[in-house]
Image (tube, rainbow, N blue to C red):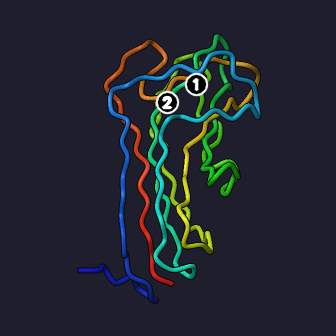
Amino acid sequence: MAVQIVGGGEIINQIQSTKYTTAQTFSSISVGSWQDTGLTLSITPTSASNRILVMMSAVGAPNYTTSNGGMQFRIDRDGTDITGVTANNVSSASNGERLTPNVGYMYLDSPATTSAVTYTLQVTAHTGTVTLYLNRNYNQSSGFSSTLTLMEVSG
């Protein structure tokens, strides 16, 4: 049974990818040097007028010695940034105590195709050049998870 969306549209198809306790390290990443996180999903829309609801939830932290650094996330479709920076300045507290925030974001995309489209969660530094961690905190504790979910919504 399809789920009816207020104002039109139905959820036609849903797929999800979760990176559980696999911690990732991105070493010496500078601002604007976008890195694929490994959270990647493909979906084939059944109609060119349908849209794709992209939802992401990511846990990560930068490792650095000064405060006010951070990391940024965005969503890429087939090699093109479709969202701009979706989470900004995920950083340490001013006293140097690092945080491990969970960042969530949703984006309704209109790929206008019936060919497979691939979405990828990417990460970069917010300031300077830093080492970034996904699915772990600054002191190497793991056990966190990040998720990418796609839902096809009828046009």
Q: Earlier in the sequence, mark 2 or mark 1?
A: 2
Q: Quadrant of residue 4?
A: bottom left
Q: Residue at x 51, y 80 (%)?
A: 47
Q: Quadrant of the N terminus?
A: bottom left
Q: Nearer the viewer, residue 136 or 116?
A: 116
**What crowding class fits label 1: few (fewer than 14 Cα within 10 Å), some (14-19), or many (20 or more)?**
many
In the depicted structure, whether residue 32 falls above or below residue 12: above
Q: In the rendered view, does 152 fall on the left or right side of 29?
A: left
- Above or below, comparing residue 84 to residue 138 in the picture: below
Depth check, mark 2 against mark 1: the one in front is 2
Helix, strand or loop at mark 1: loop
Q: Which residue is mark 2?
A: 60
Q: Position of residue 75 (x, y in %)?
A: 60, 50
- Residue 65 vertical position relative to residue 36 in the rendered view, above or below: above
Residue 116 in the image, given as x and y percentages of width and height: 53, 62
Which secondary structure lies at badge 2?
strand
Percent coordinates x, y for residue 95 in the rendering: 59, 18
Residue at horizontal 65 percent and vertical 36 percent from the top: 89
* Residue behind mark 1: 92
Q: Nearer the viewer, residue 52 or 104?
A: 52
